[in-house]
Amino acid sequence: MAGAKFITLEGGEGAGKSTQLRLLVAALQAKSIACVQTREPGGSPGGEEIRELLVKGEPGRWDALTEALLMFAARTDHVARTIKPALDAGKWVVCDRFTDSTYAYQGAGRGLGKERIAAMEAATLGGLKPDLTLVLDLPAEMGLKRTLSRPGSDTRFEKFDLGFHEKLRTAFLEIAKREPSRCIVVDTARDVETVAADIWRIVSSRFGIT
Ligand SMILES: Nc1ncnc2c1ncn2[C@@H]1O[C@H](COP(=O)(O)OP(=O)(O)O)[C@@H](O)[C@H]1O
Ligand SMILES: [Mg+2]
């Protein structure tokens, strides 16, 4: 179990990322693994300010390219101020969304395409990739239904139409297929405890946690 690990949870709206992230962090802490729980967009004071611009308001508030650049601006600050310092200090980082979400939302959903997102990634992240990405998979319609039972005002992306959310699901599954050594797909159309047990099995065996 050498070195601090960087784990991300990905998936569409209501797939269960935030729920499973809390449970995963608790399970790691129960094994005395120091970890930082964080999220995107956000995760640093500056990143959280940029988040406000991204998650509130009407779907058409931002031109797609501007939206992608704001995502990478928030991410660059988040990596510099939160993620890198934590990993350097030996703390694991468990993050709710990361670059894969930009490939899915802005690349596929909003139609910018992989290449433009890849260029932004290369210009900003210096090759930083998660050690493990859990792609939480749920039919888009089910995910959106689940978000309705949840309080909160960060609803801008939830307001995009169903076709948009179906594109996201396809994009996340394509990423997982392209990078099978980093990404594991987890079916979240099962109860919370069953999904959490599955995730713990994946994480503990990947990193040799006993
Ligand atoms: N496996 C599950 N089965 C049923 N409801 C779930 C499950 N996982 C999460 N939920 C509920 O669905 C809603 C969305 O879950 P959440 O974790 O907030 O998703 P995300 O962070 O991916 O948008 C929440 O109200 C949550 O309590
Ligand atoms: Mg969430």
Image (cartoon, helix red, strand yellow):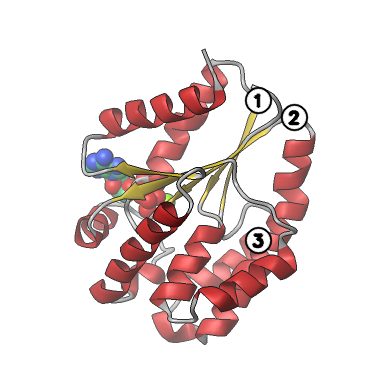
CA separation in Å, label 1 and label 3: 22 Å
> Could you tell me if the residues under marks 2 and 3 are in contact, i.e. CB atoms within 8 Å?
no
Secondary structure under tag 3 reads helix
Residue drawn 55% across and 55% down? 98
Residue 208 in view of the camera: yes
Task: Confirm if mark 1 falls within 8 A of ligand 2.
Answer: no
Decide which of tag 1 and tag 3 comes sooner along the chain: 1
Task: Confirm if mark 3 falls within 8 A of ligand 2.
Answer: no
Q: Quadrant of residue 154?
A: bottom left
Residue found farthest to the top:
210
Seen in the image, is 201 located left or right of residue 130? left
**Residue where numbered disc 2 is placed:** 90
Say if 68 sits above or below 140 in the image.
Answer: below
Decide which of tag 2 and tag 1 comes sooner along the chain: 1
Amino acid type, label 3: Arg
Say if 85 sits above or below 145 in the image.
Answer: above
Secondary structure under tag 2 reads loop
Number of the label disc, if any, that sits on residue 75: 3
Viewer-closest of 92 and 176: 176
CA separation in Å, label 2 and label 3: 20 Å
- Residue 20, horizontal then vertical, whole percent: 40, 37
**Residue where numbered disc 1 is placed:** 34
Secondary structure under tag 1 reads loop
Q: How many marks?
A: 3
Callout 3 crowding tier (Cα within 10 Å): few <14, some 14–19, many ≥20: many
Amino acid type, label 2: Gly
